[in-house]
Structure formats: C-alpha cells, structure tokens
Image (spheres, rainbow, N blue to C red):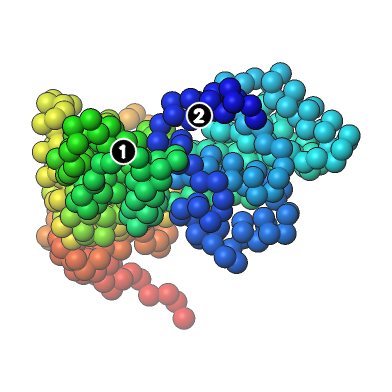
Amino acid sequence: MGLFDKQEAANLQSAQPLAARMRPRTLDEFAGQQHFLGEGKLLRRMLAADRLNSVVFYGPPGTGKTSLAEVIANHTRRRFRKLNAAAVGVKELRAELDGARDRLAVDGSRTILFIDELHRFNRTQQDVLLPDVEAGVISLIGATTANPFFSLVSPLVSRSQVFEFQSLSRADILTLLKSALNDTERGLGQSGVEVTDEALDFLADISDGDARQSLNALEIGVLSVVDVGRTLDLDIAQESIQKKAIRYDQDGDEHFDAASALIKSMRGSDPDAAIYWLACMLEAGEDPRFLARRIVIAAAEDVGNADPQALQVATAAAQATELVGLPECRIPLAQAVTYIATAPKSNASYTAIDAALADVREQRVLPVPVHLRDAHYPGAKQLGHGEGYRYAHDGEGGWVDQDYLGVDRIYYEPVDRGFEAELKERLETLRALREENRPSEPR
C-alpha cells in the first residue's frame, strides 16, 4: 500500500462512526452470542472444522450480525462479498453467484456471500439462491431482523442453520464502551476525555443491548466535550440520547412477542408485568385500538364469568380509546389491564364454545328437538313443532326439567373461583335435578 493509499484508508476510517470503526476483527474480540459462539458451541465447532455451509443470523439490530459475518470471512480466509437485499435485484444477485462459481471452478477459492436484510428479498430472489446454496458454490450468511421461519422461503431455511442473536448483556456493552475509550487507533483513546462510571452505566442501560447505539452515543458525548476539556458525566450522557429508541417492528416479532407478554401477564394475574408491556407497546407507537381489542378478548377469554364486570371494563376502555385517543387513552387502558390482571380467572366459557364448535365441525349436526322448534308460523302445529314445550318461567324457581339438546353433552364447566363459583353451585344443582327426573332405563 502506497503513501496515498494509506492516507485514503485513514480518511475513510476517520469518517466512519465509532460503532463501525470498532467492529471486531477476530472471534476473540467479538462480544456476546456465547450461546452459539462460545468454546464448544455449534458455530465455533463449524468454524474450527471449516464446515461453514449456509447460515442465517436472526436477531435485533446492533447485536453483531454484520460484524460476525466479517469476522468469519477473515477467520476462514474466504472471499467475502456483501450485498444489501434492499438495494439489489435478481441481475446483481446472479452476477455474484456466477462470479463465485467461476472462482470455485478456476482456482478452488470459496466465497462467503453475505446478504444483509435478507428478509427483503422476494420469493423469486430467494429461489435464485437455492441451487448454489445446495451445491455449496457459496456459503451464504443471511442477516435478518425478521423471524426467518416467517420471512424466508421454507427451502432456504431448511438448507441453512439458523442462529438467533440475543441483545448484548449490560456487561458486554460496558466492555465495548471501555474498549472504545482505551483504543487509540480506532476508538477514542486520543480524545483525553474522562468518562464517569455513572455515564457509562447509563449508556449501557439505555442502549437495550444495542452495541451500535451505545457506541455512537458515547462518541457524541465525547465529541461534545473534547474541545472544552470537560468530563463526560451523567448529565452529558443523557443529553447524548435525547429519547430512547425502543426496538419495535409493528409487523414483526417485537409486536407479536410484546402482545403475547401482555396477554399472558394479565392471564397470570401479574398487573405490574402487564402494565410494563402495555407501556412498552404504547411508547413504541403501537395502535391503541389494537391494544384495546386484545384487552377485550382477554377479559372474556381469561376472566369470563369469574368476574363478568371485567368484560364491561374492557369494553368501556375500548370505547374510551376511540373517544379520546392518545395520550389520554393510556389511562382507561391501564385501568382495564390492571382490573383483568387482578380479577379471578376462568376460561370455562372459552373452552365451552371451542368444544361445541369442534363437535359441530367434526360430527353430525344435531337436529333441533321438535318441542323447541319455532311454532309461530302457519302449519307449524300441523308439523308438531313446539308441541310439549314447557315455559321455564312457569316452573318453580324459573326452571323446568326439559331436554334442550337431544343428547347428553356437557360443554360449560364453571370453575370454583369468583362469581363463577356461584354459577357452578347452581348448575350442579340443576344438573342433579335433571338426573333425578330422568326416567330409569327398563331392566
């Protein structure tokens, strides 16, 4: 490399943000993901045996998917080609595959094709990859923030090993921040700025395990005080991140995972957890009407007749959400969430309708008993419809012993919690009376 080449490389590096400059160069420098990259773990064994085929790196931003792909390319000494799925079409993709095939045929050199945002490829583009992935012409490394089992075609997933990246731990983030502060070549070691432990702790906490976000915030903080010889303290660190960016894709895993956590927290009678997940979704910009609908469903599905008022509270919260909108609707939504979370639970109504639907779909549909059929039209009497029907209010206690189904089936089985315990007791009494009045079978 000549003098001008070195200067150009230095200029390009200095223009990069800190997170890009501090990308790891070796496996030992890589932070996090020890569940598949640690000693003895699957990916580490694959690399040690030089048996890297095709892999999909799936996980949130800033967890090292691109960095690990580049580290792997250096580690394996294979040719590294990088594409962004949002910026290339089938023509460019075929050109890369043809080049990899030619190199393999001419001198036996292997190619790692890294495709960032792989989920943005349509089905045709993904299908183009399949023959060369299967033949081993390329080692595909696909990076995606979307669940590959939903966003990628099944043949491509089945030919790839999926590795799920986790958000970096607080300790990992702190290690990266301190490394950047001490690195005089690529980091901030020449800045002369002192950073307090409180500031580092704040940046590690606020980044939500996103290395890129934490490093770039650190750089902003350091550059803001480097000329005035100040220390980067907690106040300046907080100014470096004006508003916490919550990772949330309304069409992706974060949306469905957070909704699942909200529902399961209400079902599990944990109002604190339920409120937290509600807050996360609201702060991330979730449509409050979606939340209201889920809350109404939870009231009927998980509380039911154990506290019938839960459905009223949830429905009122949904109506209030339509009426007042954000930010005020957070209040009735929170009221409904905490009410449902603390209410006694029963899914008896939910399981009853599903069991009945299963019978309707899978078995012969029962005929309506003749005495229950409509008898209010001309000719009904001639058909015998309604004959023998007994008006329930004429019986003692508003009940008469009468067959309403034609067969013996039990779908609704109340639990002994909340108001449903009272319903259970009453229903058991009625069922016992019906059993007593049933004519005995002839011997």
Which residue is outermost to the front?
Answer: 3
Find disc 2 in the rendering and name its residue: 10
Q: Which residue is at 78% across, 28% downward?
A: 99
Packing grade of label 2 (10 A; few <14, some 14-19, many >=20) is few
Is residue 157 shown above or below 11?
below
**Depth check, front residue: 182 or 350:** 182
User: Label 2 amino acid?
Assistant: Ala
Secondary structure of the residue carrying tag 1 is loop
- Residue 262: give x, y in percent of width and height: 28, 48
Secondary structure of the residue carrying tag 2 is helix
Residue 57, quarter of the rendered image: top right
User: Residue 290: in sight, yes or no?
Assistant: no
As drawn, the label of residue 103 is none
Q: Which residue is at 37% across, 48% downward?
A: 182
Q: Which residue is at 59% across, 41% downward?
A: 70
- Residue 238: give x, y in percent of width and height: 19, 39
**Depth check, front residue: 443 or 45:** 45
* Left/right of residue 299 with respect to residue 64 in the rendered view: left
* Left/right of residue 318 with respect to residue 134 in the rendered view: left
**Depth check, front residue: 177 or 306:** 177
Precedes in sequence: disc 1 or disc 2: 2
Q: For the residues marked 1 and 2, what is the alpha-carbon distance in whole angstroms? A: 17 Å
As drawn, the label of residue 191 is 1
**Depth check, front residue: 312 or 137:** 137
Is residue 260 shown above or below 436?
above
User: Residue 34: in sight, yes or no?
Assistant: yes
Quarter holding the N terminus is top right
User: Label 1 amino acid?
Assistant: Ser
Packing grade of label 1 (10 A; few <14, some 14-19, many >=20) is some
- Residue 187: give x, y in percent of width and height: 40, 40
- Residue 106: give x, y in percent of width and height: 89, 34
Residue 288, quarter of the rendered image: top left
